[in-house]
Amino acid sequence: MTSFEYFANTCASIEHIPGSLEMTDVIAKLLKEVTIEELPIVTHFVMGSVFPAWSDRQMGVGNRLLYTALSKSSGVSEEEIENIIRKTGDIGETAVQALSSNPAGQSTFSAFIEEKPGMEIKEVYERFTHIADTAGKRSHGTKIKNLQYLFNSATPIEARYLARLAIEQLRIGVGEGIVRDAISKAFETDVDVVERALMLTNDLGLVAVAACNGGNEEVQKLDIQLNRPVKMMLAQVTSSIQSALNDLGEVAVEWKFDGARVQIHKEGENIHIFSRRLENVTSSLPDVVKEVQENVNADTAILEGEAVAIGKDGKPRAFQDILKRFRRKYDVEAIAKAIPLKLNLFDVLYLNGESLIDNPLRKRRELLFQNVQSSDRILVDRQVITDNEEEIQEIYADALRAGHEGIMIKKPDAPYSPGKRGKNWLKKKPLMETLDLVVIGAEWGYGRRANLIGSYALGCYDPDTGKFPAIGKVATGITDEKLAELTTLFSDLVVYEAGRKIELKPEIVFEIAFEEIQKSPNYESGYALRFPRLVNVRDDKSPEEAESLERIGEIYHSQRS
Ligand code: AMP
């Protein structure tokens, strides 16, 4: 069994490593050293998550709750804890300082260090699971008590990483890319094999265990599983229909519906719906559940489609209306009546016990068509296979006239590539390209708007490190009402405040329009945006779906050519 202190020390050493290769080595060593039972836990911990992304389990620990737990564990007032965090800018260091000096002048650490048996990794995980599983009225108190127990059993180094893990902000610069490489290295398994298994299962913990048990052979056995979301295939922008035809030859053309992506898992009458962020949104969409139960013939299936909110004129409504449906936890039936959804299915990944992802799109479409009865709320819309540019232009014009975003141009013979943004799916939209960027910080406004957030700091995504390097700021410049709405949206994500500056947990994605990307030494990414403007809050996208650093570089170079 491995101690949590050993894990904490490893995190501390990783924090000082600048290069990702060396980091990979350290993590590979850690993965090899822990027991098979600890392996999935450590795999997630090292990326700053406690449970796999697909799991419904959530820690449910925000900054406030953590401050209270730290205050109760140390005897230092919550106000003082906030002061420390303002100075240190780090919840880990704050935990260490608070626990080292309680008001009686005693270190909380020294009181029990000698008789302390030392926590094991598994024990920390079990407490965290307990914290996640407590629900209801008394859950707040129970969560605090369990955190208190952990802090009061911790050594300083353990406290640093416990505090960060509790809010799932480990900040050691380790993302999926590095852990994927570390698994490959530790258990002599091909990187491609590990990567594919990750896309299918969405769970590097599971992949690590398979790799440890039998390398390539065991990992290759991992497959799509019903009721566990598969990472979704994504589309690349194409500059023109002609260039799409040049790239793909004969193409399959579909409308690009203006809605929100859903992945639907059907097991008999049992339906699970996952959002693009792979969150389980079933309870918000009872009308979609009913349509699938009544109109999808297969016993078991994984289907994908776009849920569109339809207005009185039959045209798609604003994206914000769909989000109202996806976010709603109460009075679900009432909002379902007010904002009805229509489901446009466009793919099938699994049918009657068999994975279809390696089948060509043509075949998947045929099976999809055979297994869905169309109604006015669920359908498999038209797909045209052609190499005729004019015909595609017409479909494009029709889609725009109907109020949709544009068209998807797909390669008919391509398999479904989970989690990949490649040339097999292209999208053509009329608007200038926008960027999806993660909000990483903010600043309070001035004067009348002093209690509203006035501008937001934006970051792109670096999949290797799991970090969000800064690329610029957007001043929202909108109505007070909208500013207040956004301020509330971000209130739970504040990591710390220093003067007017706020650091935010990277959770929310903004869709940003811009004039140009420039090189800039002022931002960590090395780039800056000219004239950024907020177009939409993209609640349907996860931070990892934001534009990658590599993509920003590509756009920068394409502007210049
Ligand atoms: P984007 O969000 O701009 O990257 O565009 C890709 C998204 O378009 C997908 O994730 C779907 O949510 C959406 N979409 C709408 N219609 C289709 C379609 N026919 N095929 C695939 N994706 C579609």
Image (cartoon, rainbow, N blue to C red):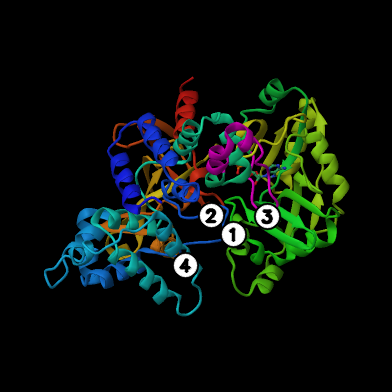
> What is the three-letter code of the residue carrying label 1?
Leu
- Vertical arrangement, residue 240 with respect to residue 465, above or below: above
- Vertical arrangement, residue 520 with respect to residue 495, above or below: above
Q: Could you say which is closer to the camera, residue 219 or residue 175? A: 219
Q: Choose the circle earlier in sequence order: 2 or 3.
A: 3
Q: CA distance from mark 4 to mark 2?
A: 28 Å
Number of other residues with Cα within 10 Å of mark 4, as a class: few under 14, some 14 to 19, many 20 or more = some
Q: Are marks 1 and 4 in contact (CB under 8 Å)?
A: no
Q: Residue at x 71, y 24 (%)?
A: 248
Q: Residue at x 32, y 37 (%)?
A: 523
Foreground label between 3 and 1: 3
Q: Residue at x 48, y 40 (%)?
A: 176
Figure quadrant, ligand 1:
top right
Q: Position of residue 364 (x, y in %)?
A: 80, 39
Range shown magenta? 207-233
Q: Secondary structure at mark 3?
A: loop
Residue 511 appears in the picture as rendered = no
Number of other residues with Cα within 10 Å of mark 3, as a class: few under 14, some 14 to 19, many 20 or more = many
